[in-house]
Amino acid sequence: MSVAKLDDQLCFALYSASNKITAIYRPLLEPLGLTYTQFIVLMALWEKDDISISALAKKAELSKATMTPLLKRLEQKGLIQRKLLPDNERQKAIVLTDAGHKLSQESGSITNNVFCATGLTFKEASSIITLCKKITSK
């Protein structure tokens, strides 16, 4: 029976790469007072806001339990508002504030800086994104 080697494991390669990318984002997001997870949620909202918390959690691939404190912090920062859905008073929709929309203008330079820091070509990055989507679609 062979012993599993850490450096040969897909899970470890993805885990290590994810940690590295998050570490690159951290100092870029710090001046904005955002965590990486908050930035992920904002990017999802910049694509489409005024959506239910459930839909947002699904888009950002986060649990509903994670969403509640995260959304509370974004609301305290004045970046989002929660509003009742007209057809369902038990659910709330998440809407970007003007400040939340304005922040989107800085997102391109942040993601570009992270991309440059990886040393990947556009083709390499596109291939990795496609492969990761293949894994997560299963």
Image (cartoon, rainbow, N blue to C red):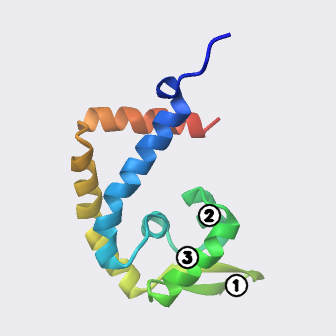
Q: Which amino acid does label 2 sit on?
A: Ala
Q: In this view, does 125 lie above or below 20?
A: above
Q: Distance between the residues labelled 2 and 3?
A: 13 Å
Asked whether 130 or 68 is in front, the reply is 68
Q: Give residue 50's mark.
A: 3
Disc 2 secondary structure class: helix
Residue 6 or 17: which is nearer the viewer? 6
Residue 75, how many percent across, how many down?
52, 86
Lateral position of residue 123 relative to residue 86, left or right: left
Instruction: Residue at 35% x, 37% y: name it.
Output: 126
Left or right: residue 43 versus residue 25 is: right
Cα–Cα span, label 3 and label 1:
12 Å
| Percent x, y of residue 73 | 53, 82
Q: Mark 2 points at which residue?
A: 57
Crowd band around label 2 with a 10 angstrom C-alpha radius: few (<14), some (14–19), many (20+): some
Q: Badge 1, how many Cα within 10 Å: few under 14, some, many 20+?
A: few
In the image, what residue type sits under mark 3? Asp
Residue 47 sits above or below residue 123 on the image: below
The numbered dot on residue 113 is: none
Tags 3 and 1 touching, CB below 8 Å: no
Which of the image's four quarters has the N terminus?
top right
Picture coordinates of residue 106 (x, y %)? 26, 71
Q: Residue at x 27, y 72 (%)?
A: 105
